[in-house]
Image: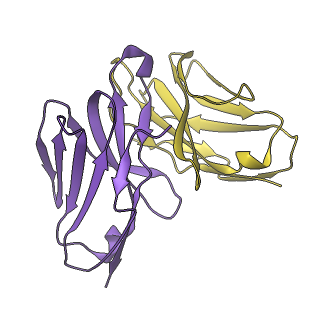
Amino acid sequence: KAGVTQTPRYLIKTRGQQVTLSCSPISGHRSVSWYQQTPGQGLQFLFEYFSETQRNKGNFPGRFSGRQFSNSRSEMNVSTLELGDSALYLCASTYGGQTITDTQYFGPGTRLTVL
Amino acid sequence: SQQGEEDPQALSIQEGENATMNCSYKTSINNLQWYRQNSGRGLVHLILIRSNEREKHSGRLRVTLDTSKKSSSLLITASRAADTASYFCATGVVGSSNTGKLIFGQGTTLQVKP
């Protein structure tokens, strides 16, 4: 099976702009989780989608949002970008049928730079 | 907030030596997982140990879990230069409100010198 894919791989934006990142999970996986990785805060959970519904959300401002489509592909959007949003954004997929968090399979990430 | 604290933060060893990394966590877990990350790329899953397991092996990897101490260790035996990477522990926390969410430690950066 093909792995998790993320597009674009690199992105440069300026403050105040908005950005949309895309994630295609492994075929058959219905859960997609998003994480932000920065040198200062490490890996932090953003949100998780399962069968087109947001099932869990981390402690991020409302500028961070996401959605999932019927084919399980997911997008996350960040509006009104700030310098501190510069980070590696990782998505991960899993089958998601259980209520516990099992092995997650990560994509290569999108490196976002905000100038 | 980070649940896992990893120790050491950085580790440098010679090829062929063993590397041991430790992870502590704070709350009740369903499982604990270890991931590897090479140079800011995506994370690669290494091993998962469930809360009712005490030890697990996978190739050159050995993971232990002590739920009474809320700690885990990852041992890489006979290390290779290709093992150079950052290693993260991640916990799947109990509770349906935590579904799909892994809480990561800050990671251990391992350098294996040829």
| Residue A90 screen position, x and y as percent | 55, 44
Q: Quadrant of the N terminus of chain A?
A: top left
| Residue A47 screen position, x and y as percent | 56, 27
Q: Nearer the viewer, residue B84 or B29?
A: B29
| Residue A21 screen position, x and y as percent | 68, 39
Q: Nearer the viewer, residue B43 or B63?
A: B63
Left or right: B4, with B29 as reference point: right
Q: Quadrant of residue B53?
A: top left
* Residue furthest out toward the bottom: B114
| Chain assigned yellow | A
| Residue A76 screen position, x and y as percent | 66, 32
Q: Nearer the viewer, residue B33 or A39?
A: A39
Residue B74 against residue B3 in the figure, above or below: below
Q: Quadrant of residue B66?
A: top left
| Chain assigned purple | B
What residue do we see at 11% from left, 40% from top? B54
What residue do we see at 58% from left, 56% from top? A39
What residue do we see at 50% from left, 29% from top? A32
What residue do we see at 45% from left, 44% from top? A3
